[in-house]
């Protein structure tokens, strides 16, 4: 699937580059042709103006006037021999000219930047008098020049849309895979658990098995919890009001019994024991079980695990800190990716599942607050207050 997406991305990118490159080259060619034609049109207009000024018969005046009046798109400004505007111009906004005294000067500078070579009509040689005509870009020429940029934006948006669709499709297939795997795991666990429950009932009927029955019962209950957790992955979560403190406290007690005596657990609730939020208990406990397991692995049997709860604006923040080996900076971005693990054994799905549970089922966030190699790591769970 990744190879499929990569190939499509490469193909679309190459196609976009080809389209935009071809468009830019062609539009520049067309722009040059239009600019050359407009230069000829301005020269014809200036020649017509010259004819009108020097005409000796009506036929020449009529022809020149017709040529002059046909220019409806190219803006032109007339100046004298000293490049001072005479006040004559065409195809410019008259209202702006009346409201802004410097309008013609601004436009003249703009036209000079576009084409510094004016067309000149010499009125008198001695003393020298002349009219100069500067012209700017027509609306058509501007549109042609802007066309490749507009097309580039359209192609970029198209490419972005296709990329988002492909990413969405990939994430959807990944979600389906997660859900299918979780439900299949729950199904597979169901059969041996049912069998163990049957054997447990038989043991209860015999004497002197109380200790064994009690321990087996605990393990079966634990298996039932694990089965329930996996069965909820991929299903619509059923949230109800629960106290985060109580759920986390139960996980701490469970992990404390199964860890080294050299590991110290500290839980600071900051008077939030009675705070209730909408949670799915089995999944919420699973998240903190995974975080505590990771902390224990990082400390390798000795150290301090500190859990703190506090409110910040409209969120409950829960920090889980350890003083273990920490995470290298180049590995931080991979921590929540499925399959990533630094341990010799394990699937590397615990943190990925935990992030999914917090963010998709509880509308919260799970992230690494800080980590330093040799000093430890702090994970933070943030949950919205109802």
Image (cartoon, rainbow, N blue to C red):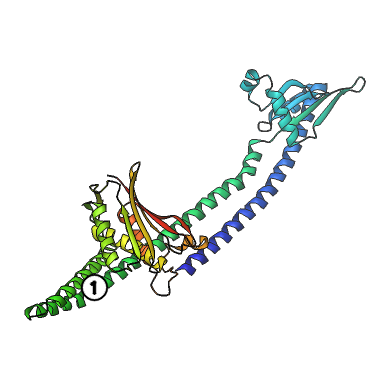
Q: Nearer the viewer, residue 380 or 132?
A: 380
Image point 26% across, 62% down: which residue? 253
- 206 relative position to 125: left or right: left
Image point 63% across, 25% down: which residue? 93
| Tally of numbered tags | 1
Q: Position of residue 13 (x, y in %)?
A: 56, 59
Crowd rating for badge 1 (residues with CA inside 10 Å; few <14, some 14–19, many 20+): some
* Quarter-of-image position of residue 37: top right
- 200 relative position to 246: left or right: left
Q: Is residue 46 above or below residue 154?
A: above
User: Which residue position is annotated with label 1?
Assistant: 187
Q: Position of residue 89 (x, y in %)?
A: 71, 24
Image point 25% across, 50% down: which residue? 278
Q: Of helix, strand and loop, which one carries label 1?
A: helix
The single residue placed furthest to the right in the displayed view is 126
- Which image quarter is the N terminus in? bottom left
Q: Position of residue 367 (x, y in %)?
A: 41, 55
- Which image quarter is the C terminus in? top left
Q: Nearer the viewer, residue 62 or 181?
A: 181
* Quarter-of-image position of residue 22: bottom right
Residue 355 seen in render: no
Q: Position of residue 193 (x, y in %)?
A: 19, 75
Q: Is residue 23 above or below residue 43?
A: below
Residue 31 seen in render: yes
Q: Nearer the viewer, residue 176 or 151?
A: 176
């Amino acid at each position: 699937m990744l190879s499929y997406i990569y190939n499509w991305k490469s193909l679309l990118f190459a196609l976009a580059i080809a389209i935009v490159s071809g468009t830019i080259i062609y539009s520049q060619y067309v722009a040059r042709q239009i600019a050359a034609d407009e230069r000829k049109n301005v020269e014809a207009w200036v020649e017509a103006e010259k004819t009108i000024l020097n005409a000796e018969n009506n036929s020449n005046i009529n022809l020149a006037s017709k040529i002059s009046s046909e220019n409806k798109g190219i803006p032109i400004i007339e100046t004298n021999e000293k490049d001072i505007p005479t006040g004559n111009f065409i195809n410019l906004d008259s209202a702006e000219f009346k409201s802004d005294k410097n309008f013609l000067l601004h436009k003249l500078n703009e036209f000079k930047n576009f084409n510094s070579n004016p067309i000149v009509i010499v009125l008198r040689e001695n003393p020298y008098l002349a009219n100069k005509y500067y012209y700017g870009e027509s609306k058509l020429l501007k549109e042609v020049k802007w066309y490749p940029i507009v097309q580039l934006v359209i192609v970029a948006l198209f490419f972005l849309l296709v990329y988002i669709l492909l990413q969405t499709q990939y994430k959807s297939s990944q979600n389906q895979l997660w859900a299918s795997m979780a439900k299949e795991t729950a199904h597979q666990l169901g059969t041996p658990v049912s069998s163990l429950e049957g054997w447990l009932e038989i043991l209860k009927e015999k004497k002197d098995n109380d200790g064994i029955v009690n321990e087996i019962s605990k393990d079966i209950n634990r298996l039932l919890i694990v089965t329930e957790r996996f069965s909820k992955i991929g299903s619509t979560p059923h949230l109800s009001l629960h106290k985060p403190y109580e759920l986390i406290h139960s996980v701490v007690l469970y992990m404390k019994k199964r860890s080294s005596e050299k590991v110290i657990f500290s839980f600071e609730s900051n008077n939030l024991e009675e705070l209730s939020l909408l949670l799915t208990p089995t999944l919420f406990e699973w998240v903190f079980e995974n975080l505590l397991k990771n902390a224990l692995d990082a400390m390798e049997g000795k150290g301090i695990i500190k859990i703190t709860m506090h409110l910040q604006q409209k969120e409950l923040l829960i920090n889980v800190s350890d003083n273990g080996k920490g995470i290298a900076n180049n590995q931080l971005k991979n921590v929540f990716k499925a399959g990533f693990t630094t341990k010799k054994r394990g699937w590397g799905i615990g943190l990925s599942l935990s992030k999914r549970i917090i963010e998709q089922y509880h509308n919260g966030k799970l992230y690494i607050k800080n980590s330093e190699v040799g000093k430890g790591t702090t994970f933070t769970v943030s949950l919205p207050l109802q």
